Image (tube, rainbow, N blue to C red):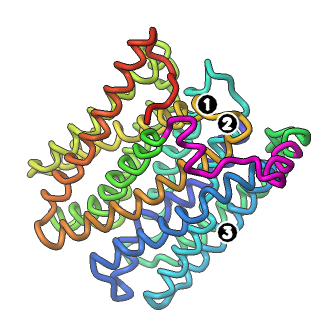
Amino acid sequence: MRVLFGVILLDLIGFGIVIPILPFLSPKLGADKMDIALIIVTYAIGSGLCGPFWGRLSDRMGRKPVIMICLAGAALSYVMLGLASQLWMVYVARGFAGLMAGNFGVASAMMADMTGPENRARGMGMIGAAFGLGIVMGPMIGGLLSGDSASFTLPCIFAGLMSVLAIIAAAVFLPESLTPEKRAANRSQYRNNESLSTYRLLHQTRNRLLVMQYVIHNSCVSALTYAYPLWLGDTLGWGARQVGIVFGLQGVLMVIFQGGLLGPLVRLMGELRLLCITVTAFWSGMVAAAFATTMPAMVGSMLLAMTGATVCMPLLNTLASHRIPVASRGRMMGITSAASSWGRVIGPLLAGAALATFGFRAVWLGAAGIVLFYVAWAFREMLLARRIGGAGPVQGQG
């Protein structure tokens, strides 16, 4: 588990370098606020299209080689972005990055392979902690490398270097989690057309509503990720360095909750009860942001919302891994990764339209309204679990 954590951490440092600087890089090439949203959407569309492919390929080929292929694609995309001299090049670089963005779903499947039901939430939390550390270290490194001159070539090249280091670490130290016999059985299943279609798989396992929560979750998170730097820039006059510090602080909270507190909290409360609490915190933070007028309130409301959101994700991944046949685990995590990506398509588009028409308050209230469906689903699942005798994982509903 530690090696997988390290590989994902290196990858996400590169990701963390690039994400906060995109809203500041793109306007230098002539982008407006809607362009920034569309650039985020371009990445998400690519990821949504290819997420199930990478998950299915990892079931047949193994997790390790797919992770390495995706890392190589990420490295190339960062270099392309750093060398972009026109706006269309940014679109191409982010679209290609999306097509190669299979790592998170495949890594989640690999972690599920490595853990049992009793410690799977902790394992998923380690992936979340790697994401958090990446968000801590990446924006800080990106801000330092870009400096006041706002040159973004060096941060992007450095992000590519992180992906190259991750490839080397995976090649040398990361063990394959699927045995040759299991991979051969999966390949035989696909050759014999015995594998269910995506719709039938979700229908038979009754996980359609669970997958929908990935769409809702990520549409709102991506809306916040898109609008938050713009909000701080327009309202407080902040630039990439200050925004990077806030993202870094958020990453620290992610590491604390996902890397240290998630396992004990799950043992104390159960996955579904904890999910209800964290998704409520997610909703509360967005409502607070809609009425925030001072810097502490603006930063605090977003830290509350994003901390709640980031603890929700490993809990969703744990529930998904419990509720699917082992032979289709990679495919299921690819499906949830794709659902997350389609959420990242919807979120920035809606946020961009709301921002252009009504302003920032409409973005926060609109996202809070959507998250109410997420809150309702989580409480419904907890009540259903109690009805059948426990607050642990239950078979999917809907």
Residue 111 tag number: 2
Residue 58 at x, y percent in the picture: 74, 51
Image-based side of 61 in relation to 283, left or right: right
Q: Is residue 19 above or below residue 128?
A: below
Image-based side of 168 in relation to 97, left or right: right
Kind of residue indicated by mark 3:
Gly
Residue at numbered disc 3: 73
Q: Quadrant of residue 49?
A: bottom right
Residue at numbered disc 1: 123
Residue 87 at x, y percent in the picture: 43, 87
SS label for mark 3: helix
Q: Which residues are magenta?
A: 184-207
Kind of residue indicated by mark 2:
Met
Residue drawn 66% across the image and 74% down it: 76
Q: Earlier in the sequence, mark 3 or mark 2?
A: 3
Image-based side of 27 in relation to 184, left or right: left
Residue drawn 59% across the image and 29% down it: 322
Inter-mark Cα distance, 1 to 3: 26 Å
Inter-mark Cα distance, 1 to 2: 6 Å
Residue 172 among magenta residues:
no
Inter-mark Cα distance, 3 to 2: 22 Å
